[in-house]
Amino acid sequence: MKTLTVALERRSYEIHIGSGLLAGAGAAVRAVCPRAGRLFLVTDSHVAPLYARKLEESLTGAGFEVARHVIPAGESSKCAGQLSELWEQMMDVPLTRTDAVIALGGGVVGDLAGFAAATVLRGVDFIQIPTTLLAQVDSSVGGKVAVDLKAGKNLAGAFWQPKLVLMDTDTLATLPDSTFADGMAEVIKYGCIRDREFFDFLRARPSRAEIMAEIEPVLYTCCDIKRQVVESDERDTGERMLLNFGHTLGHAYELAGHYETWTHGQAVAAGMAAACRVGVTLGITPPEVPGQVEEALAALGLPTAIPCARDNYAAAVGRDKKGEGEDISLILLAELGRAIPHKMPKAALLELL
């Protein structure tokens, strides 16, 4: 098992990465939640049949009473209606302020359960047990929790750091290839923005089998990069914005597909490729970079371009959380392995697109 510590003073926590961690989850959770009697386990309809019982057996073996709540799988569950239902179910248990919430699943489960934990009883402890590659390298670390609104993704949320993140690499074995590829979009992102050597490492392993053979160091590298960024900018006002490389335009592609046609990973992949092309046009990104990034993405079956109407670009750019008035900070690559924020008028970006 590999371990990382996210050092945020009283909000510090460990990330555990390894095989077979679900079986020992009870002891790990007891170590960080010594006073808890009840655990409210949130999972989804895809993950519950695979891993919920195994996790519950470990938790009850550590002396916890476990209440399970299963949400329908999919982005549509990350909504105010499901959040309200979670609050009511938590009160029916009843959950107390010394108890904790556990998220077992992908990013939707983690974001929804985390926001519920951040707000119920004005905040209870929260454990992340991500089961998808995308959640393991991205959404489970850093404390961003949210639900979607009709206006767009993640527009109602909070910063609520987990007490522990457990990444059992065995859970990746049951992912469909398309879902694994979604996670690889975020993995490639880390190489693009912070670590050229890691990017080259990934390009030399353009298949799921090759990545899985090195999965612990891959997860560790991604989480270590995110750890460093979160420690320096927990509330997303400076350096942490670099983690959104590909996301400003990616959100437009998700919107264009009504959040059904394109997955988050596919949209981010195309968003990174588009940002590279914009960077070249602006004279910021070296001209060879778009081709290198597109090659790495395409090798894993990820799109490098998605059709998008101006209205969808305008909506995504207008609501982007990196916007300031009429300007936006678009994350671009000064070179492979080094991202920078480039402040420009939103109208100018729309013209380029």
Image (spheres, rainbow, N blue to C red):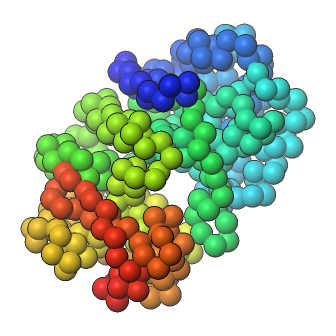
Look at the image and tell me in which quarter the C terminus lies: bottom left
Residue at 46% x, 53% y: name it: 237
Residue 244 falls in which quadrant of the image?
bottom left
From the top left corner, tell me how far across and down residue 319 is, in percent: 54, 72
Q: Looking at this view, is 155 or 1 the one in front? A: 155
Q: Position of residue 62 (x, y in %)?
A: 67, 10
Question: Which residue shows up at 30% across the image and 85% down it?
Answer: 352
Q: Quick one: which residue is furthest to the front in this view?
A: 325
Which quadrant: the N terminus? top left
Position of residue 43 in the picture relative to residue 240 (left or right): right
Q: Answer with left or right where residue 346 lies relative to residue 220.
A: right
Left or right, residue 205 beside residue 91 = left
User: As rendered, which of 348 and 192 lies closer to the eye?
Assistant: 348
- Residue placed farthest to the right in the image? 92
Task: Tell me where residue 272 appears, x and y as whole percent.
Answer: 31, 65
Q: Is residue 18 left or right of residue 199?
A: right
Residue 272 makes an appearance in the image: no
Residue 227 is at least partly visible in this image: yes
- In the depicted structure, whether residue 116 falls above or below residue 95: below
185 vs 26: above or below: below
- Along the viewing direction, whichever of 331 and 114 lies nearer the viewer: 331
Within the image, what quadrant is residue 197 found in? Answer: top left
User: Horizontal and vertical percent for residue 306?
Assistant: 37, 77
- Residue in view at x 67 percent, y 71 percent: 150
Q: Count every numbered label the image shows and give the total.
A: 0
**Relative height, residue 117 to residue 168 (above, below):** below
The residue drawn where x is 36% and y is 50% is 239
Q: Is residue 333 above or below residue 255?
A: above
